Image (spheres, rainbow, N blue to C red):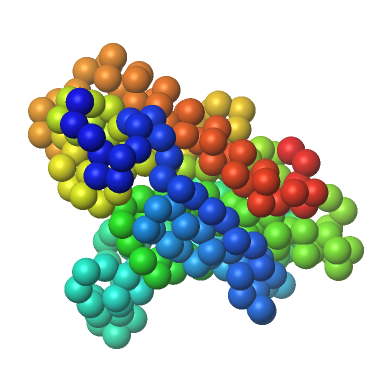
Amino acid sequence: MAERIDGRAADQLRVTTIQRNFTRYAEGSVLISAGETKVLVTASVEDKVPPFLRNTGQGWLTAEYALLPRSTHTRSARESAQGRVGGRTHEIQRLIGRSLRACVDLSKIGERTILVDCDVIQADGGTRTAAITGAFVAVVDALHWLKEKRLIATIPVTDHLAAISVGVIDGVEMLDLCYEEDSRAGVDMNVVGLASGQFVEVQATAEGQPYDRASLDRLLDLAQGGIANLVAIQREALGEALSV
């Protein structure tokens, strides 16, 4: 088997760290680093909900995502300067939002919105999955802030949530792809899952030859192992802030 670019085993995560309270003003904020990928995530609380939820007592959670202009090898223009958000950005924003909504009981936060901003400051593959993994911690901190203010009774998180990429490179299933690996992958998959082992979303694409069910099962097993390791990192970062 060919050696990975950074010498990792096929089933080994990149070095991953989560720094809480990374910015001063947001109710929840983290810097998550997965190898050379670095994402700043903030979770902000607003005392309002979209029109379709007014007078329902239900809260909401939504997300925005952006690659900062020099997060990659060459500078890309800000989408705001271009006057529109691209299709890839829309897709990732919706993925982050619905993933987080799968593990937060929004009926227990009142008519409030948690807005999650994921800004990629350095990209080396796996930006969406790192954003989701870091966003979970930022959201927990925002909910913890609400609880400390006695605005909610409990932290309404049902399970830990994390996400990871897997893929097939030169016939070998690998975990947590960096950009160079991702660009060569014959199969590319992003998996969002819970600590319980349940899946929230699976995005899998054959970039070359189609893959069979056995390969799919091996990739899912690989992803579940990676998610379990990420949940352990989240637990260590959160300490006593969350007990699920």
Q: Nearer the viewer, residue 105 or 233?
A: 233
Residue plotted at (61% across, 28% down): 196
Residue 7, by quadrant, is top left
Name the quadrant of the N terminus: top left
201 in relation to 215, above or below: below
Q: Position of residue 237 (x, y in %)?
A: 66, 51
Q: Position of residue 105 (x, y in %)?
A: 69, 46
Q: Which of 56 and 34 is in front in this view?
A: 34
Residue 23, by quadrant, is bottom right
Query: With 231 as the anchor, is 156 left or right in this view?
Result: right
Residue plotted at (27% across, 19% down): 215
Q: Which of 169 and 155 is in front in this view?
A: 169
Q: Can residue 98 be seen in this view?
A: no
Q: Position of residue 85 (x, y in %)?
A: 31, 71
Q: Is residue 152 visible?
A: yes
19 in relation to 9, above or below: below
177 in relation to 63, above or below: above
